Image (cartoon, rainbow, N blue to C red):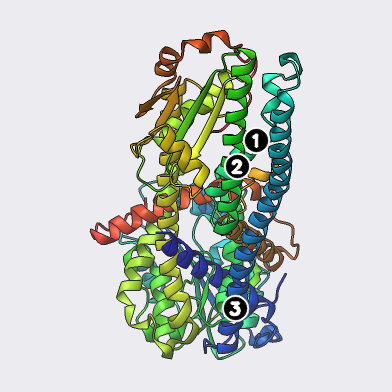
């Protein structure tokens, strides 16, 4: 048992060290291009797929209208995927109230078929050079598009992901996700640096339209079409860059049940897509992605579940011992604060090192995403509690994947 | 904020190797640190052991002097070194740790057991000469995995010693390779059916609760009960 724990800990630490080391080496191979003149800017279609998004669609559209990008070069396509609420009415009200919006926002309605069908619906109705998506719970920074387009000046790059931040965290759970998003900023940045991005997130990833068409458009991808498309792009040798300064703020679940449902969907989607694209795993021809990133992403799920089970087992054992002690003696053992009794086992030291490395990842993510190393205020909460929550949806997703149950968006 | 980034996915083996070396170094350092801290603990116990050695000498001297002094000069409770119980607790803790020099640990345990035996003998002599009725328990346990109830018995005795600070509990590892201890076991005819307690010269086998011990040892009632808890371990 102990050797298994050490092996899992070694591999987990190795991945953290590898990413941080790659971060320090990142200057090598960075693709930064000067932006073109306005006349040469590519045309862009931003798709806003909506299914019952009456609460968020207004701010999403407003942020798109505020993009600092020539208006004649942007098409905003709101695809109503069979909403039963006032999504379309809210969008129409906005268009009516905003001068110039009618020329820039096109609304289409279709039968509900899922996000991938909404994206393909838009793909069939646009002739722009680039196409991207902005989920209706997200808002973009006015400069986000121009920063992404700059990167796409490099013809070798087929897609660019943005820097995604949590939108207006309020509850303690949202503050913890806010911290997690900083780690995701780091991961997305580093995976792009390793040529191994395997997700092109819904909030404002921008693609070359021709590439998406050539690959056959969006697919269902087990409710994670953004992951499926990225893996398909990788399979066909396309480069996916990351522009962390292209800032997007996305809505995050307020409640645990919402978060749980979202993360089960993400993890389930990853597992099923990993099975679909299993030929890439441990395949040298896919470089870092095949050799390290995909295997370790799968491994980290197994490790998190294992550590959680072990922790529960140890806690149960300790609780049983305490109960036995109370039953036998009627008292609890007297606690001691003597230095002599401080836990200095190798395992404990390694756990502390792992926690320190996670803090380093949060700081690196903050630096990449905001320019400041200062971690968000929810960091202590995140460090204390989040690792107890994650295995819950990882475990649920694994079970669902094994039994092939499928997952729902909502 | 960082500029945009992308790179080919070609594996850079040197980064793989350097990351492996760094991770291995972190692991090596963690193990070395653990060994170091346990070494420091052993050194602390060694210091206490030196003190115990002096105590042994002092006990012997005290025993020699006893013949020429009145009982008033020898207080029963001053005989047992105050360092013995903490050393017992610390030894017990160190036994549960990994990355500990087992030879060193064994040496420390032997000294600890020897001191307890010496104290026991002296206490019996003092009691005989001065007409005292000492209240004590000898506890034999095993850490070899062949004693299911030893852990529980340890909890009971710890609680009992917290309840009655004047109660002397001498705990011995039944399997410890120490001739004096083996003699003690033989003299008292303690069988390898642990846990075993010697209370009022009778060997009791099996787990005994506080209630059981209070029945077997009614003299406990003559001891003062603790007002506040003092941590004591006999595991």
Q: Is residue A303 left or right of residue B110?
A: left
Residue A100 at least partly seen: no
Where A224 sits versus A157, above or below?
above
Marks 1 and 3 sit apart, C-alpha to C-alpha, by 48 Å
User: Image quarter for residue A63?
Assistant: bottom right
- Check disc 2 and report its element: helix, strand or loop: helix
Q: Are marks 1 and 3 on the same chain?
A: yes
Q: Nearer the viewer, mark 1 or mark 3?
A: 1
Which residue corresponds to mark 1?
A: B84
1 or 3: tag closer to the N-terminus: 3
Marks 3 and 2 sit apart, C-alpha to C-alpha, by 46 Å
Quadrant of the drawing holding the N terminus of chain A: bottom left
Q: Is residue B150 left or right of residue A360?
A: left
- Check disc 3 and report its element: helix, strand or loop: helix
Q: Residues within 10 Å of mark 3 (few under 14, many from 20)?
A: many
Percent from the top left, x then y, of residue A43? 56, 80
Q: Is residue A224 left or right of residue B70?
A: left
Q: Which chain does the residue under circle 1 lie in?
A: B
Residue at 57% from the left image edge and 46% from the top image edge:
B109
- The mark found on residue B19 in the picture is 3
User: Image quarter for residue A334?
Assistant: top right
Q: Contact, CB < 8 Å: mark 2 with mark 1? A: yes
């Amino acid at each position: 048992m102990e050797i298994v724990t050490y092996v899992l800990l070694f591999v987990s630490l190795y991945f953290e060290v590898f990413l941080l080391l790659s971060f320090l080496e990142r200057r090598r191979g960075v693709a930064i291009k000067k932006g073109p003149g306005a006349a040469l800017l590519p045309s862009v279609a931003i798709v806003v797929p909506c299914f019952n998004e009456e609460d968020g669609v207004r701010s999403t559209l407003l942020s798109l209208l505020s993009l600092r990008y020539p208006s004649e070069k942007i098409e905003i396509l709101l695809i109503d995927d069979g909403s039963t609420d006032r999504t379309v009415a809210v969008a129409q009200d906005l268009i009516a109230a905003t001068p110039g919006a009618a020329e820039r926002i096109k609304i289409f309605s279709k039968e509900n078929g899922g996000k991938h069908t909404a994206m393909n619906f838009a793909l069939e109705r646009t002739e722009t050079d680039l196409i991207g998506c902005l989920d209706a719970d997200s808002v973009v920074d006015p400069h986000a598009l121009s920063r992404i387009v700059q990167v796409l000046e490099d013809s070798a790059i087929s897609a660019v992901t943005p820097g995604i931040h949590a939108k207006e965290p309020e509850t303690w759970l949202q503050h913890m996700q806010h911290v997690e998003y900083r780690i995701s900023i780091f991961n997305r940045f580093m995976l792009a640096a390793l040529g191994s991005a395997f997700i092109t997130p819904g909030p404002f990833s921008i693609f070359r339209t021709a590439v998406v068409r050539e690959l056959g458009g969006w697919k269902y991808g087990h409710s994670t079409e953004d992951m499926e498309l990225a893996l398909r792009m990788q399979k066909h040798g396309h480069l996916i860059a990351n522009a962390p300064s292209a800032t997007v703020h996305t809505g995050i679940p307020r409640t645990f049940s919402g978060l749980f449902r979202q993360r089960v969907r993400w993890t389930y989607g990853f597992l099923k897509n990993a099975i679909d694209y299993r030929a890439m795993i441990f395949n040298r021809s896919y470089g870092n992605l095949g050799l390290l990133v995909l295997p370790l992403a799968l491994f980290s799920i197994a490790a998190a579940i294992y550590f959680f089970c072990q922790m529960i087992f140890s806690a149960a054992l300790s609780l049983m011992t305490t109960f036995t002690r109370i039953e036998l003696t009627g008292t609890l053992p007297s606690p001691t604060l003597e230095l002599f009794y401080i836990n200095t086992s190798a395992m404990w030291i390694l756990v502390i090192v792992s926690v320190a490395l996670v803090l380093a990842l949060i700081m690196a993510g903050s630096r990449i995403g905001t320019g400041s190393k200062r971690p968000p205020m929810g960091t202590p909460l995140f460090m204390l509690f989040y690792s107890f929550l994650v295995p819950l949806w990882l475990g649920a997703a694994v079970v669902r994947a094994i039994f092939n149950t499928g997952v729902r968006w909502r | 904020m960082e500029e945009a980034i992308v790179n080919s996915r070609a594996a850079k083996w040197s980064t793989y190797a350097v990351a492996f070396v760094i991770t291995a170094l972190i692991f090596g350092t963690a193990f070395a640190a653990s060994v170091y801290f346990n070494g420091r603990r052993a050194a602390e116990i060694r210091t206490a052991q030196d003190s115990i050695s002096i105590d042994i000498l002092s006990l012997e001297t005290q025993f020699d002097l006893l013949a020429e002094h009145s009982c008033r000069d020898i207080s029963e409770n001053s005989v047992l070194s105050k360092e013995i119980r903490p050393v017992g607790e610390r030894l017990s803790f160190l036994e549960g740790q990994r990355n500990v020099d087992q030879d060193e640990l064994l040496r420390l345990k032997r000294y600890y057991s020897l001191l307890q035996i010496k104290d026991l003998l002296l206490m019996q002599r003092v009691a005989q000469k001065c007409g005292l009725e000492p209240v004590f328990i000898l506890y034999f346990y095993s850490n070899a995995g062949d004693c299911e109830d030893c852990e529980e018995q340890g909890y009971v005795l710890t609680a009992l010693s917290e309840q009655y600070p004047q109660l002397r509990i001498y705990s011995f590892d039944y399997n410890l390779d120490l001739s004096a201890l083996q003699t003690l076991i033989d003299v008292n005819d303690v069988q390898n059916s642990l846990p075993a307690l010697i209370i009022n010269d009778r060997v009791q086998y099996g787990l005994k609760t506080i209630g059981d011990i209070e029945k077997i040892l009614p003299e406990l009632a003559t001891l003062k009960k603790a007002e506040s808890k003092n941590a004591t371990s006999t595991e």
